[in-house]
Amino acid sequence: MLDHYRMFADYNRWANRRIYAAAAELSEAEYREDRGAFFGSLHGTLNHILAADRIWMKRFTQEGEAPTRLDAILCKDLNALTAARMAEDERIIAWIDSLDEARLNAHFTYSRLTTPDKITQRLGPALAHFFNHQTHHRGQAHATLTALGRPSLTLDLVFFLWTEGEKWMA
């Protein structure tokens, strides 16, 4: 499973770069326009993905800053958000690379943001959620881009594997 999560961390960075490159081609008004996604605009959606990543990474590692709201706007503009996203992707990759199978199977405990409930679970399934959550909201970002008349992006994992992720196919 470790290689599986390492592949997802690598894929995550690749997909984020594609989404952010497409966002950089938008006007400021388009970037901030509410297109009906769960977090409204592309700006809101990309901030949410980063916020959720930081929340989960704080839970996983007990390190770093984490917002207290899922709709937190961590960065006011796309340039700052891009830099923060790139740093977070590298942080995720480094942390995933530090794991071993025993750690994947170990339990950890965290509190939800919306209720004081404590949850204890194995790390592996939580990582599956972590990467799936990113993919889910990148899909909303993709839908926002196409609703704004931009070309559809290829974000499929298999396309990543055929291009920049060939090492994962060996």
Image (cartoon, helix red, strand yellow):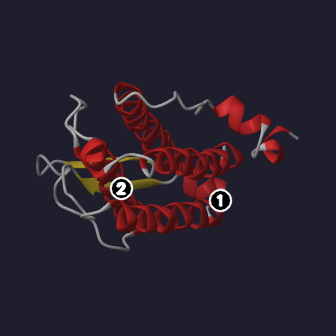
Q: Residues within 10 Å of mark 1 (few under 14, many from 20)?
A: few
Q: Residue 43's spot in the image, x, y percent?
A: 28, 49
Q: In which quadrant will I find the N terminus?
A: top right
**The label number, if any, that marks residue 100 in the structure image:** 1
Amino acid type at circle 2 is Leu
Question: In the image, what residue occupies the spot 21% across and 58% down?
Answer: 73
**Quadrant of the image occupied by residue 36:** top left
Q: CA distance from mark 1 to mark 2?
A: 25 Å
Question: In the image, what residue occupies the spot 51% across and 29% down?
Answer: 151
Circle 1/circle 2 CB separation < 8 Å: no
Q: Residue 161's spot in the image, x, y percent?
A: 75, 37
Question: In the image, what residue occupies the spot 24% across and 64% down?
Answer: 76
- Please indicate whether residue 153 sits to the left or right of residue 107 in the image: right
Q: Nearer the viewer, mark 1 or mark 2?
A: 2
> Mark 1 or mark 2, which has the lower sequence index?
2
Q: Residue 106's spot in the image, x, y percent?
A: 50, 54
Q: Pick whichever, 11 or 155, lies toward us.
A: 155
Q: Which residue is mark 2?
A: 50
- Please indicate whether residue 102 sits to the left or right of residue 82 in the image: right
- Please indicate whether residue 151 sits to the left or right of residue 56 in the image: right
Count of numbered badges drawn on the protein: 2
Residue furthest left as drawn: 115
Amino acid type at circle 1 is Asp
